[in-house]
Image (cartoon, grey):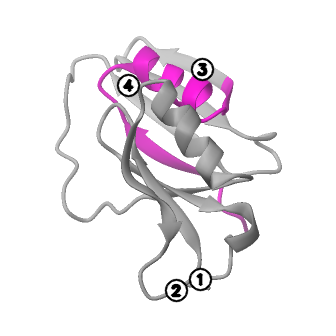
Amino acid sequence: MRLLHTMLRVADLQKSIDFYTKVLNMNLIRQSENNEYKYTLAFLGYGDEADTTVLELTYNWDTSEYELGDAYGHIAIECDDIYATCETIKSMGGEITREAGPVKGGSTVIAFVKDPDGYMIELINKKDAGKGLG
């Protein structure tokens, strides 16, 4: 078994695709529409869907906003240089909600950014990824 994808419901599909492709450098892997049930799916990621976990964006045509709830935490993305990544995100109008730096009580370098729908994304410096608090 392996983890295939994580799904997020989005209010503006193109705005979300632009964020994930232009700001976070993901690739749009595939997109499909279901006219009968009025939704569009877009799959994005950093590699081939056969080998890596991807992100599924679901756009329900008749829904313009969602309540995120209090159970959702975040999606984590590894990056080569977290400080440069945060600067690029800010220069492209992205919202950094926690600047890059060590996690409280540890040494792992993290940052947080919000996507257009308010979903939180944790950035983790590549050298620290998979080490927990460090």
Task: Classify 10 Å Cα crowding around label 4: few (below 14), some (14-19), many (20 and above).
Answer: many
Q: Mark 2 or mark 3: which comes first in sequence?
A: 3
Dot 2 corresponds to which residue? Answer: 106
* Residue 61 vs residue 55, the one in the foreground: 55
Distance of label 1 from label 2 (alpha carbons): 8 Å
Distance of label 1 from label 3 (alpha carbons): 34 Å
SS for callout 4 = strand
Task: Classify 10 Å Cα crowding around label 1: few (below 14), some (14-19), many (20 and above).
Answer: few
Q: Quadrant of residue 108?
A: bottom right
Q: Mark 4 or mark 2: which comes first in sequence?
A: 4
Residue drawn at point x = 81 percent, y = 39 percent: 48
Which numbered tag is attached to residue 59?
A: 4
> Identity of the amino acid at label 3?
Gln
Dot 1 corresponds to which residue? Answer: 132
Judged left or right of residue 66, residue 28 is right
Task: Classify 10 Å Cα crowding around label 3: few (below 14), some (14-19), many (20 and above).
Answer: few
Q: Position of residue 2 (x, y in %)?
A: 71, 64
SS for callout 3 = strand
Q: Position of residue 49 (x, y in %)?
A: 76, 41
Circle nearer the viewer, 2 or 3: 2
Task: Classify 10 Å Cα crowding around label 2: few (below 14), some (14-19), many (20 and above).
Answer: few
Distance of label 4 from label 1 (alpha carbons): 33 Å
Q: Mark 4 or mark 3: which comes first in sequence?
A: 3
Residue drawn at point x = 21 percent, y = 24 percent: 63
* Residue 124 vs residue 7, the one in the foreground: 124
Q: Mark 4 or mark 1: which comes first in sequence?
A: 4
> Identity of the amino acid at label 1?
Gly
Distance of label 2 from label 3 (alpha carbons): 40 Å
The residue stretch that appears in magenta: 1-29
Dot 3 corresponds to which residue? Answer: 31
Q: Magenta stretch: residue 111 in it?
A: no
